Amino acid sequence: MKESILVVDDEEDIRELIRYNLTKDGFRVTCAATGEEGLSLVAAVKPDLIILDLMLPGIDGLEVCRRLKTDAAFKSIPIVMVSARGEEPDVVSGLELGADDYISKPFSPRVLLARIRSVLRRGKSGPVDQQALVKVDGLVLNPVRREVHIDNSLTELTNTEFKLLHFLMRQPGVVFTRDQIVDGVHGDDYPVTDRSVDVQVVGLRKKLGSYGPYIETVRGVGYRFKG
């Protein structure tokens, strides 16, 4: 059997859609309709991953996420949030609390499965070696020599651009808010406003050429490197 997944969503149709597709793919699935029920089942089931709707009756998804991520017994359990587009500010808050990814309603089961597999793979990969060579197709980043090669040609990046690219590349598929990017990069000259982060990304994409689209904009939230 594959991993155990807890689905917390108050919409029965969505719970059953997720349950059917995950069970079909071999996962063990437990469902909850409220935040309170979800918190109780986390302790009972000890799932490998939680799919968490933000809009829940009683304790909402954001509070469920906060409680789990501040509890030493459960904070390592990855959380994929499910949201409507109007909940984007809450998505940002959830990611900053420690949620691992999110998916907007309506979503396709194939996309949800891909996100789940990606998050579970990241959880098994262990700590990230910040000095290790990072390679995606013909894009190679060498943190020790502070060099970036595109299809075997050296590409000149500023110190900030290099740190930004390295931060995103070493955790492919992870969605980062702009504030998380600023905190993660910690460059002395790194911009501290949302707008200047966007400008840095635009410039970096241009220098990466055909690999520019690998830095994906997550609407209303931030950025991720294609994973």
Image (spheres, grey):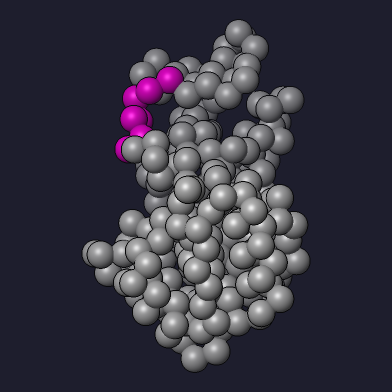
Identify the residue at the far left of this view: 72
Q: Position of residue 37 (x, y in %)?
A: 44, 82
Q: Quadrant of residue 90?
A: bottom right
Going by the image, does 164 lie left or right of 45? right
Compared to residue 106, the image places residue 144 above or below, namely: above
Q: Give the residue drawn at x 74%, y 25%.
A: 210
Q: Position of residue 177 (x, y in %)?
A: 53, 56
Q: Give the residue drawn at x 43%, y 20%.
A: 133
Identify the residue at the far bottom of this view: 58
Stretch in magenta = 127-133
Asked whether residue 52 is in view, the answer is no
Q: Nearer the viewer, residue 41 or 173?
A: 41
- Asked whether residue 130 is drawn in magenta, I would say yes
Q: Position of residue 154 (x, y in %)?
A: 57, 12
- State the count of labels: 0
Question: Which quadrant is the C terminus positioned in?
Answer: top right
Q: Give the residue drawn at x 40%, y 61%.
A: 47
Asked whether residue 152 is in view, the answer is yes
